[in-house]
Image (cartoon, rainbow, N blue to C red):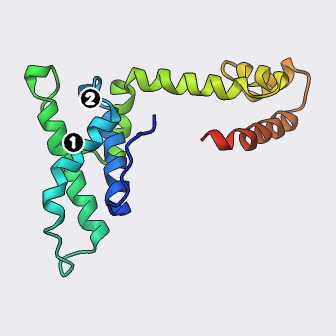
């Protein structure tokens, strides 16, 4: 799910890192009832006073912002994960490598539902035969779908390529 916040006038490097880490921590169980916009705003409020303390002699600006947002995101997770709210203590990393193992367990259900609704809408804009193929590929493999539709796998792959090109404007 994409954020609807607009950050015109703010350095795009800061915006990029805040959005990235907000999206990462939004998937955690302790942020189930928070919107992505609220998480972004909270991160901005936490980092804004510190951004002015940047010293170019110590590091590059993107590196400084990355570390700053990362540390503030960890602090936000710790704050949100307190026992009073039923969270888990001891979260100290939100690197993608560490987070990948946690996503299946803590993935936010409403994001999955929103993605499903978006995908269903995009599929509904396709020609009927492509819609049928997309629905079949939800449960069948490409060779199985090719056999059911009595077409070659190459034709299925070519059709999927055309579907990707047609739906690129939605994503």
Indicate left or right for 145 with 152 as reference: left
Q: For mark 2, does the 10 Å Cα neighbourhood hold few (<14), some (14 to 19), or many (20 or more) residues?
A: some
Q: Quadrant of residue 143?
A: top right
The reply, left or right, for residue 3 in relation to residue 87 is: right
For mark 1, does the 10 Å Cα neighbourhood hold few (<14), some (14 to 19), or many (20 or more) residues? Answer: some
Examine the rendered structure and indicate whether residue 61 appears above or below residue 71. below
| Residue at mark 2 | 31
Which residue is depicted at the point 23% across and 66% down? 64
**Between 66 and 166, which is closer to the camera in this rendering?**
166
Q: Looking at the picture, how far across and down is residue 36, in whole percent?
A: 34, 35
At x 77%, y 23%, the residue is 131
User: Is residue 90 visible from the viewing direction of this image?
Assistant: no
Q: Residue furthest front?
A: 9
Image quadrant holding the N terminus, namely top left
Q: Secondary structure at mark 2?
A: helix
Q: Quadrant of residue 85?
A: top left
Question: Is residue 102 something one can see in this rendering?
Answer: yes
Observer-nearest of 6 and 133: 6
Which residue appears at 57% of the width and 27% of the height? 118
Residue 21 is situated, as x and y percent measured from the top left of the image, at 32, 46
Nearer to the camera, 63 or 122: 122
Which residue is the site of mark 1?
42
Asked whether, in this view, residue 18 is left or right of residue 53, the answer is right
């Amino acid at each position: 799910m994409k954020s609807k916040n607009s950050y015109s006038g703010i350095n795009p490097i800061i915006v990029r890192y805040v959005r990235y880490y907000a999206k990462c921590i939004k998937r955690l169980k302790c942020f189930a009832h928070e919107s992505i916009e609220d998480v972004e705003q909270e991160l901005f409020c936490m980092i804004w006073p510190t951004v002015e303390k940047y010293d170019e002699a110590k590091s590059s600006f993107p590196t400084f912002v990355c570390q700053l947002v990362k540390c503030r995101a960890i602090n936000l997770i710790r704050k949100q994960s307190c026992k009073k709210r039923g969270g888990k203590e001891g979260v100290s990393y939100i690197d993608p490598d560490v987070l990948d193992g946690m996503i299946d367990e803590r993935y936010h259900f409403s994001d999955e539902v929103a993605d499903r609704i978006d995908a269903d809408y995009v599929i509904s804009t396709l020609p009927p035969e492509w819609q049928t193929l997309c629905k079949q590929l939800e449960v069948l493999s490409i060779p199985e779908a090719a056999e059911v539709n009595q077409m070659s796998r190459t034709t299925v792959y070519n059709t999927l390529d055309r579907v990707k090109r047609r739906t690129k404007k939605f994503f």
